[in-house]
Image (cartoon, helix red, strand yellow):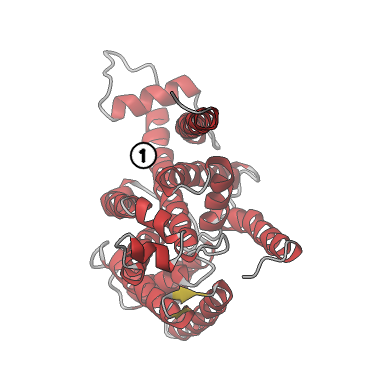
């Protein structure tokens, strides 16, 4: 027989697991709903039922003897809006997952791929691909150079902020600012040698955009993004161990320094792949994991998939707002996420100061 205290703990664990499952289920259902709504709405609105029918038909899930929708509706939904929404799902999930990993790795909710300079490194790699004319030769050069730029920035930031295997988040943020400033200078220098068309391409990276994303962009990054995200999720248990501290991690046979390097590598790759098709979309990796941690707790086995789902949901909503709020004009999605994320970041700083939390 279990003691009364043990029974209470068992019941609390059951309730906690039940709550986590409900959050995951709600995120999945919410994401499916928002994907359909975001695909249906726009300058030409298509009914939700027809939107679902078009998607299922063109994905090969169902067949119609006589299509209950017009050819123009099918073209708008499946060849214009739906691939853009799919890219938003991939990018949002990738950035949020990378942010959750970095916050767990550095044990602080202020860590984020954009804030600490990794996104800037990826953007520089992409700009260099444009400047060297590599994007005209193959679509694969941009994600390759973006990944290289992100990884180099990550290594520099890691080296500057680590001391004896431990990190100061304040040093991390300052190192990220310094690296971002240096990368910005290199980017500005590169811009002086670009023509007008290439400079316009660079504006894509400076604000973050999903405009004009098509199926070729989905095919370009979908598999690599999913693989890199899977690799990050495989480190969920190790992230839980890292939260316990250096000595505790070593006592269970985990090498903290080696684990952090692998986490940093895959987080950089994930961020770079996302940035290569969307540009620098800020704060997704900051807001989403922090909110999900409040909802599902710090267990990364739940937090990582929850953050990925919520990140996809968040970016699809932000992109929908960017498309319809001032129709027929369109706001870049990076502007929307920055308008939401910057005040939230300041709120986190204010709360940390008020609670006397050392960064």
Residue 237 or residue 305, whichever sits in front: 237
Q: Secondary structure at mark 1?
A: helix
Left or right: residue 137 versus residue 81 is left
Tell me which residue sits at (27%, 72%) in the image. Answer: 134
Tell me which residue sits at (45%, 84%) in the image. Answer: 186
Where does the image place residue 314, in percent across and percent down from the top left?
A: 53, 44
Relative to 153, residue 138 above or below: above
Where does the image place residue 124, in percent across and percent down from the top left?
A: 41, 75
The residue that label 1 is drawn on is 79
- Image quarter where the N terminus lies is top left
Q: Residues within 10 Å of mark 1 (few under 14, many from 20)?
A: some
- Image quarter where the C terminus lies is bottom right
View extreme (top): residue: 65
Q: Is residue 267 something that shows in the picture?
A: yes
Where does the image place residue 191, in percent across and percent down from the top left?
A: 46, 81
Relative to 154, residue 112 above or below: above
Residue 198 or residue 6, whichever sits in front: 6
View extreme (right): residue: 354
Relative to 137, residue 75 above or below: above
Residue 130 or residue 152, whichever sits in front: 152
Q: Toward which corner of the image does residue 171 lie, by quadrant? A: bottom right
Q: Toward which corner of the image does residue 345 lie, by quadrant? A: bottom right
Q: Is residue 33 something that shows in the picture?
A: no
Residue 44 or residue 18, whichever sits in front: 18
């Amino acid at each position: 027989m279990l003691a009364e205290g043990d029974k209470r703990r068992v019941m609390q664990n059951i309730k906690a697991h039940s709550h986590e499952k409900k959050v995951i289920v709600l995120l999945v259902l919410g994401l499916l709903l928002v994907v359909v709504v975001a695909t249906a709405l726009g300058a030409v609105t298509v009914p939700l039922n027809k939107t679902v029918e078009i998607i299922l038909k063109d994905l090969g899930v169902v067949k119609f003897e006589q299509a209950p929708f017009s050819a123009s509706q099918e073209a708008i939904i499946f060849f214009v809006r739906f691939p853009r929404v799919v890219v938003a799902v991939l990018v949002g999930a990738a950035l949020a997952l990378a942010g959750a990993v970095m916050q767990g790795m550095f044990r602080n909710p202020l860590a984020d791929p954009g804030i600490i300079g990794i996104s800037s490194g990826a953007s520089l790699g992409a700009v260099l691909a444009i400047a060297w004319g590599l994007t005209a030769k193959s679509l694969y050069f941009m994600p390759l150079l973006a990944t290289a730029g992100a990884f180099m920035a990550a290594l520099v930031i890691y080296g500057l902020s680590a001391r004896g295997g431990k990190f100061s988040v304040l040093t991390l943020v300052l190192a990220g600012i310094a690296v971002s400033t240096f990368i910005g200078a290199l980017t500005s220098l590169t811009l002086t040698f670009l023509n007008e068309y290439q400079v316009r391409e660079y504006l894509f990276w400076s604000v973050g955009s999903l405009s004009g994303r098509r199926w070729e962009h989905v095919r370009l990054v979908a598999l690599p993004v999913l693989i890199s995200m899977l690799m990050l999720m495989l480190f969920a248990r190790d992230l839980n161990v890292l939260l316990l501290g250096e000595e505790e991690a070593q006592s269970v046979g985990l090498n903290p320094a080696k684990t952090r390097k692998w986490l940093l590598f895959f987080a950089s790759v994930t961020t770079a792949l996302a940035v290569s098709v969307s540009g620098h979309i800020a704060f997704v990796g900051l807001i989403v994991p922090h909110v999900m941690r409040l909802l599902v707790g710090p267990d990364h086995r739940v937090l990582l998939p929850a953050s990925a789902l919520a990140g996809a949901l968040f970016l699809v909503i932000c992109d929908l707002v960017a498309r319809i709020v001032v129709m027929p004009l369109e706001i870049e999605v990076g502007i929307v996420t920055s308008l939401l994320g910057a005040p939230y970041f300041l709120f986190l700083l204010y709360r940390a100061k008020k609670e006397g939390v050392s960064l």
